[in-house]
Image (cartoon, rainbow, N blue to C red):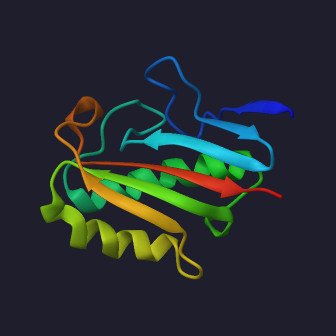
């Protein structure tokens, strides 16, 4: 099996010892994305709506670098700082997964990197 590392300047650089994504066995495993602006590496966090849209922009850039799109995503993991944010994040999530939404879990966690409110990772099937 061939493993390929995926990185793009259109998404934030990894803030730890990992890559933005890894292709392996026909799948793309995208690391959790938080609302960092890839150009400035500053947090976009004035509202949960803005945070969530930035996370999806980052995911989109990584998927596109690998030749994929949201329609290739088969699994999503959503991490929230508070389940009270679920309805708002879910509304925005539905804007990106219009047809054939992937399998998913959504959990509230005690703390996320850089104290953000949302982090999302995805797995996409590339064939």
Quarter assignment of residue 2:
top right
> Residue 104: x, y in percent?
45, 64
Q: State the image quarter where residue 6 is shown.
A: top right
Q: Residue at x 50, y 47 (%)?
A: 58
Q: Is residue 5 left or right of residue 113?
A: right
Q: Residue furthest right?
A: 1
* Total count of labels: 0
Give how far across and how far down residue 99 sits, in percent. Answer: 58, 82
- Look at 48% across and 34% down and name the residue there: 39
Toward the viewer: 72 or 38? 72
Residue 1 lies in quadrant: top right
Residue at the spot x=54%, y=39% of the render?
11
Q: Is residue 54 above or below residue 98?
A: above
Rendered location of residue 15, percent (x, y): 43, 23
69 over 114 or under it: above or below? below
123 relative position to 15: left or right:
right
Q: Is residue 38 above or below residue 18?
A: below
**Residue visible at 65% across and 51% down in the picture:** 63
Q: Residue furthest bottom?
A: 99
115 over 124 or under it: above or below? above
The quadrant of the image that shows the C terminus is: bottom right
Residue placed most toward the observer, 73 or 11: 73
Residue 34: horizontal and vertical position, in percent? 37, 42
């Amino acid at each position: 099996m061939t493993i390929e590392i995926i990185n793009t300047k259109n998404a934030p650089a990894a803030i730890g010892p990992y890559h933005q994504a890894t292709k392996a066995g026909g799948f793309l495993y995208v690391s959790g994305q938080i609302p960092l602006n890839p150009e400035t590496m500053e947090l976009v966090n004035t509202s949960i709506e803005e945070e969530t849209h930035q996370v999806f922009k980052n995911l989109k850039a990584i998927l596109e670098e690998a030749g994929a799109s949201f329609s290739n995503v088969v699994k999503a993991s959503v991490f929230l700082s508070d389940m009270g944010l679920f309805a708002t994040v879910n509304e925005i999530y539905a804007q990106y997964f219009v047809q054939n939404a992937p399998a998913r879990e959504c959990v509230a966690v005690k703390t996320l990197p850089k104290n953000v409110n949302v982090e999302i990772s995805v797995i996409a099937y590339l064939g």
